[in-house]
Amino acid sequence: MSEHVRMILVRCSGRDRPGITTGLLGVLADSKAELYDMEQVVVRERLTLDILIGVTEGDDVLKELLFHAWERDLQLDFEVVDPTPPRTGLPRFVVTVIGQTLPAAAVGGVTGAIAAGGGNIERIERLSRYPVVSYEFVVVEGSIDQMRAALLEAAAEHNVDVAIQRQGLERRAKRLVVMDVDSTLIQDEVIELLAEEAGCLPEVRAVTERAMAGELDFEASLTERVAKLAGTPVEVLDRVRERVTLTPGARTFVRTLHRLGYTVALVSGGFEAVVAPIAAQLGIPRAVANHLEVADGRLTGHVQGRVLDRPGKAQVLRDIAAQEGVPLEQTVAIGDGANDLDMLAIAGLGIAFNAKPVVRAQADTAVSVPYLDAILFLLGIRRDEIEEADAEDPSVVEGGWYPVPGIPPV
C-alpha cells in the first residue's frame, strides 16, 4: 500500500432495501477507490454495512459517498484504521447457547465466560426464536479449556445449555448421527412399558434407575429385568409399540438430517421388536438393538444372542462409520444413559440429551431442553432454514412425519 493511501472503514446504516450495497459499490467503482474488505448484516430490517477502502489524498470519494447516502436516507460514519494487515491463523471457535428463554443476564454470562477464557467475539447470529431461543457466537483466540470451564459455570448459573466447538472443516463435515432410542428418540423406557403390561413395573423400574445412573452393570441389569417378563404373551409388544411416544422434534430432527445428506442410525439397549418399526417409520435405514427370545407365543425371559451393552454400542458406531466410510471425527452420537458413555466418547461430537448427571459431566456438550431438533442448532442450522425446507417439501404431512406403507405411525 502506498504511504499516501489512507485506509478508511466506512459504516453505512439505515432501513434495508434492495440496491443499497450496489449503489455504494458503484460510487467506489467510479472513484477507483481500493476495496479491501466488507461485511453486512441485517437485523429487523435495519442494515449495517462495513466497507474497508483505501483513499488517496485529494480523493473526493468520501464526499461522494456522503452525498449518495444523504439522497437515500442512509447514515455514514468514517474511521481511519491501522493499515497493518490482521493476523491470520488464529484459533477460532463456535459457542452455541440454547435456552427456553435467553434473558440479558444469561447471554451476558456466556459472553463473560468467553472473555474470561481469552476469547474475542467476532460475530453473533441468532439461530432460533422457538421452540427454544438459540444464538451462535464465532470466537477468535482464547483457550478452549478455559472457556469451556467458564461456560459450564455460566450454563449452570443461568440454566441454559452451552456448547463450544472448534470452527473448521470437521465441524461442517459431520456426516453420521447415531443415537440412542429410549429417553432420547422416544420419551419412554420400553422395558418399563413391557413391565407395566406384565405387572412387574415397580421391580423393573428400580433396577432401571440404578443401571442408567451407572451403579449397575448394564448387561446384568438388563438380564435381570428381562427375566421378570418370562411368560408374558408376545402380543404385549404390539400394545407397547402403540404406546411409544416420540420425543418432541424427533421427526423434524431426522427429516432435516436426511435432507442434509447425513446417515442416521439407531443403537439401543432396548428391543428390536419395538425399535425397528420406529426406524422404518422415520426412514432410518440402520437400527441395532437387543432381541427378545420368544417361544410358544410368550416371552421366555431371555435376550437372544449377546446383549448390546455400553462397549457394544460404541462398537456399533465404529462399524457403521467404517461401512459408510466416515471418519469417527465426522460422527455425532446422542444418548442419555451411562451405557451411552463409550459411544459419546469416541464420536467427533458426543451430546448428552436430557441425560443423567454422570453423562452430562462426561459428554462434549449437553442439551437439556425437551426438543430433539434443538440439537440441529449445535450443527449451525437455523430454524428458518428448517421451516423453509419443510414448506417446499410435499412429502411433509401434518405432524411432520413421512408415511411408510404398512407401518403404523408411532
Image: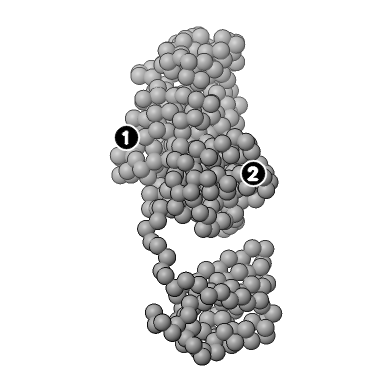
The residue labelled by disc 1 is 319
Distance of label 1 from label 2 (alpha carbons)? 41 Å
**Residue 322 shows in the view:** yes
Q: Against 157, is 61 above or below?
A: below
Residue at (42%, 70%) from the top-left corner? 84
Which color scheme does this rendered protein use?
Answer: one colour
Proximity of marks 1 and 2: CB atoms separated by less than 8 Å: no
Mark before the other along the chain sequence, 1 or 2? 2
- Give coordinates of residue 187: x percent, y percent: 58, 30
Of residue 36 and residue 227, the one placed in the foreground of this image is: 36
- Give coordinates of residue 21: x percent, y percent: 56, 77
Residue at (53%, 40%) from the top-left corner? 150
- Give coordinates of residue 43: x percent, y percent: 64, 63
- Quadrant containing the N terminus in the rendered view: bottom left
Residue at (35%, 19%) from the top-left corner? 306
Other residues around mark 2 within 10 Å, as few (<14) / some (14–19) / many (≥20): some
- Quadrant containing the C terminus in the rendered view: top right
Hey, which residue is sitting farthest front in the picture? 3
Amino acid type assigned to the residue bearing label 2 in the image: Ala
Other residues around mark 1 within 10 Å, as few (<14) / some (14–19) / many (≥20): few
The residue labelled by disc 2 is 106
Of residue 404 and residue 176, the one placed in the foreground of this image is: 176
Q: Against 80, is 41 above or below?
A: above
On residue 249, which mark appears?
none
Q: In this view, does 6 lie to the left or right of 245?
A: left
- Of the residues tagged 1 and 2, which is closer to the observer? 2
Question: What element does badge 2 sit on?
Answer: helix
Question: What element does badge 1 sit on?
Answer: helix
- Give coordinates of residue 2: x percent, y percent: 39, 82
Amino acid type assigned to the residue bearing label 1 in the image: Asp
Residue at (59%, 87%) from the top-left corner? 63
Q: Against 89, is 157 above or below?
A: above
